[in-house]
Image (cartoon, rainbow, N blue to C red):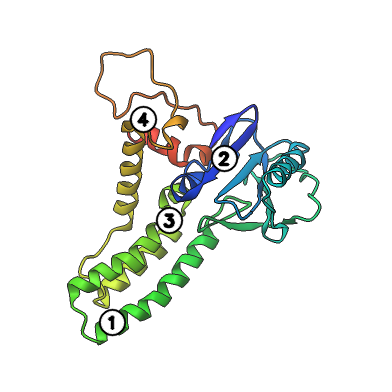
Amino acid sequence: MVLRSGVLRVAVRHSVTGRSLLMDSGLCGARGLNAVAVVVPESRSPSVTATIHSNRTLHTYTYTHHKDWSSANRLNINLSKTKEMVIFRPVSRVKHIPPREITGIERVHSAKLLGICFSDNLSFAAHIDNTLFAVSQRFYSLKQLKIRGLNQAALDIVFQSLILNKITYAVQSYSGYLLEQQTDRLQAVLNKAKKWGLVSVLYNLREILENQDYRLFNQIVTDPQHCLNSILPPIRTCVFDTRDRGHPHELLCCKYNAYKQSFLNRCLFRYM
């Protein structure tokens, strides 16, 4: 996610870069950004572009640009699957005037993109509810496998594939915005799995979140070819002879907590 002249533009290509769309999702934490409009056009092409911006008139022009580009490349945009969502800073005292709606595109309060549900108030409660609902259904399958005599080692593998991977999918993108209550709900699922004997190890969700953040951030910092390496801040030019830091990059100025809790800023401060 790159901020250029007040316009946040994200290009989503395939699954690897697609996951990066929400990695730095401090949408309403950017300086001077009180509201943004997200237009997600869907087409038959393998790449989808989501444009996020704060200009009230630019969003219509941006969509027109995508539409013209699709027509020029003989790709049809499915308007029934194209949604618009206006995101406001949750605690802003400024009275927001939503931008004019785009003809033919539905404006929604929540949307699912690349398997992540996010809403216009930057809450991930809907995504947690959907995740817990899917996990509860998969618990039944695990219980049936256990009843039919599947050994514990194989149950652990199935649990990691069906349950743990579901909970931790793209968790770096939103873990900084989770409330303690939501984290406890996810932890309760892992506790229940251990109690029912569906897994031999009691997983600690907070440790998993910490490890996921560190592993991805370390890959971004150490690999110049990583798709997210380009969004890192510049390397410090003024270096003092003090303790070794976890990374050589500058710390960004974060005025709002929502911006600081985004993945990149969260890791820059945590692993400095």
Disc 4 and disc 2 in contact, CB within 8 angstroms:
no
Secondary structure under badge 2? Answer: strand
Of badges 3 and 1, nearer the viewer stands 1
Q: Amino acid at mark 1?
A: Leu
Question: For the residue carrying disc 1, how many other residues have a C-alpha within 10 Å: few (<14), some (14-19), or many (20+)?
Answer: some
Instruction: Determine which residue is flagged by label 1.
Output: 145
Disc 3 and disc 4 in contact, CB within 8 angstroms:
no
* Residue at the limit of the structure toward the bottom, as seen here: 148
* 106 to 32, vertically: above or below: below
Q: Amino acid at mark 3?
A: Glu
- Circle on res. 243: none
Is 69 positioned to the left or the right of 210 in the image?
right
Q: What x and y, as percent, mark residue 61?
A: 76, 38
Can I make out residue 214 in this image?
Answer: yes
Secondary structure under badge 1? Answer: helix
* 135 to 90, vertically: above or below: below
**Quarter residue 51 falls in:** top right
Q: Amino acid at mark 4?
A: Pro
Q: Report how far apart the C-alphas of labels 2 and 1 lie in the structure.
A: 42 Å
> Which numbered disc flags the more N-terminal residue, 2 or 3?
2
Q: Nearer the viewer, residue 156 or 256?
A: 156
